[in-house]
Amino acid sequence: MAVVQGWKNWYPGRLGYVDFVFGLDNLRNDGRGCEDYRSLDLETDVVSNSSGSSRVRLANTDILVGVKAELGEPAADKPSEGRIEFFVDCSANAAPEFEGRGGEDLALAISNTLAQSYDNVSSLDKRKLCVIPGHQCWVLYVDILLLECGGNLFDAASVAVKAALFNTKIPNLDVTKNEKGEPSLELRDDPFDCMRVDVAAAPCLVTLNKIGYHHVVDATREEESCTLARLIMGVTADGNVVTLKTEKSGSLDPESVFEMMQTGKRVGISLNNTLSAKLKQEETMAPKKGKKAFLR
Amino acid sequence: MSKDNRRLPVPSESKSPYLFVSKDKKPTVLVDENHLRSDGRKVGEIRPIYIRAGAVSQARGSAYIEMGQTKVLCAVYGPREVTRREDFSMKGQLKCELKFATFSRRYRCQHQSDNTEKDLSMVLRDTLEPAVCLDRFPRSHLDIFVTVLEDGGSALAAAITCASVAIARGGIEMYDLVIGMTVYDEPPTDNGTVTVGWLPCIEQISGLTQRGQMDISITKECLKQCVASCQKMYPVIQQTLIKAHPNKLE
């Protein structure tokens, strides 16, 4: 049995979902298979005041990400590396529960999972963000704004973050030393002389929701409400797992965890590859005329 | 690192002393050719443990655990009524707060919880929830306070074990105990840690976190190693609870 606890809490609606939906050829109520994502709209360079931005719409989930690059001090234990900081804002527009401090836990969970998945050398080479070791480095502030919640926030947020980082342009700096030997920074004259962030190895999060005996990716809000346990994985394009965590109040059998990890790896690789291809394709497209409106 | 200027009034241009600390102190070889670690343990061997159920007299249940240099204290209060109407639920709720004592690590921790502590608190809550019979205390919550007095590694694993012993000692109904265990994967191949919350009787995983990059085959191995070590710890924890019982069971 996959889930120990919770049988008592399964009201007929929940059981109904599991029985009815997976009864016919393992299809879900919107016709998808267990490893299918909903269609995803992606657009980069949507906010003019940021160094990089993106907007992702995954069915009803709508996420806007802005990246701002600022100069700051490196962390004391990593003097020759830049920093990347995540902040998630659960707008009360998205769900009335988020009003006041309601969305704080969810926001923290998303930002910590993202920070964890980017906190290793292989995901993002932060040494390139260093300007003067021990003194100055680029700090990438990644702000994630949830505009609408339609389930699967973790995956959508990670896709949006990767797209926004791909779009980020950081001005190139020259470090010169004056006669006293003190370093000073100089910005180049050409405003288009920029450095890009290499996101080839950046991870995408894949959430696997255990419903009954099945595990599904990209759960809708309804599916999330009948999920007792879920596994969130950060997967890179070459199939390495950079973060892993379980959530919600159900326990899992080790064998089913292994199965979920296999699925997550498979889905994560294809998600990364599709995303990279689409980002490259978008970049070669002709520039947009005027800015598009949000939530359209 | 954020500076506490009231405590250490330093000139504004000063730099963190940690920048000048040599990094040579870390043992370069974690496992030597005889498969022994720097403190003489085997690869799959856990540090000596000391657990005591019942350490804080005011609390409903409490526990103290030492795993080598890692020392964790946990107190459980409640179940208390939920005061906010929006938080009402027919299932009981767990409120976990994990705090590193300011002197527990090499870097001084701040009084206010930082993101790491909040994250660990959430992991702890998610790991304990499957083990507690939440439907036994509807519309109320259980407060679980965990203080890490000294962090010598695997603080989260120690906190999980300690909290589950404290809940059990408080007489709160549980499906099973939860035992925490962390495995560190040595660098050449990958570099990461896997922490598991294991339900030893039901034989299921209540919580699983991995930090750092790993291939899933290695995660799988680490997980199996964690489970094996948890099962070894189980009789010790059972004995602790029996010993701590006020009626002195035979």
Image: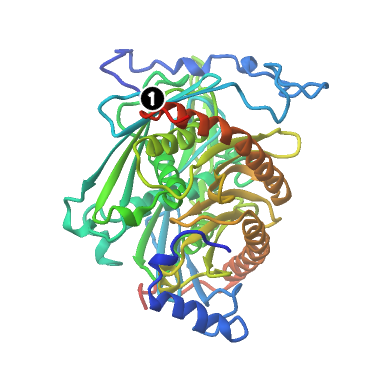
Q: Quadrant of residue A277?
A: bottom right
Q: Position of residue B51 (x, y in %)?
A: 48, 25
Residue B225 appears left or right of A112:
right
In the rendered image, the quadrant that contains the C terminus of chain A is bottom left
Above or below: residue B216 compared with residue B170: below
Residue nearest the viewer, comparing A251 with A280: A251
Q: Position of residue A103 (x, y in %)?
A: 30, 56
Q: Residue furthest front?
A: B250
Residue nearest the viewer, comparing B1 with B67: B67
Output the chain of dot 1.
B
Neighbour tally class for label 1: few under 14, some 14-19, many 20 plus, Cα within 10 Å: some
What residue is at 33 percent from the left and 13 percent from the top? B11
Q: Does residue B67 show up?
A: yes
Residue nearest the viewer, comparing B185 with A15: A15
In what element is the residue under mark 1?
loop
How has the structure been colored for display? rainbow
Q: Position of residue B128 (x, y in %)?
A: 43, 46
Q: Residue furthest right?
A: B33
For badge 1, the amino acid type reads Cys
Q: Which residue is mark 1?
A: B109
In this rendering, the count of numbered labels is 1
Above or below: residue A224 compared with residue B244: below
What residue is at 53 percent from the left and 38 percent from the top? B180
Q: Quadrant of residue B135?
A: bottom left
Above or below: residue B26 compared with residue B182: above
What residue is at 38 percent from the left and 73 percent from the top? A11
In the rendered image, the quadrant that contains the N terminus of chain A is bottom right
Q: Position of residue B157 (x, y in %)?
A: 52, 35
Above or below: residue A54 compared with residue A11: above
Q: Does residue A88 show up?
A: no
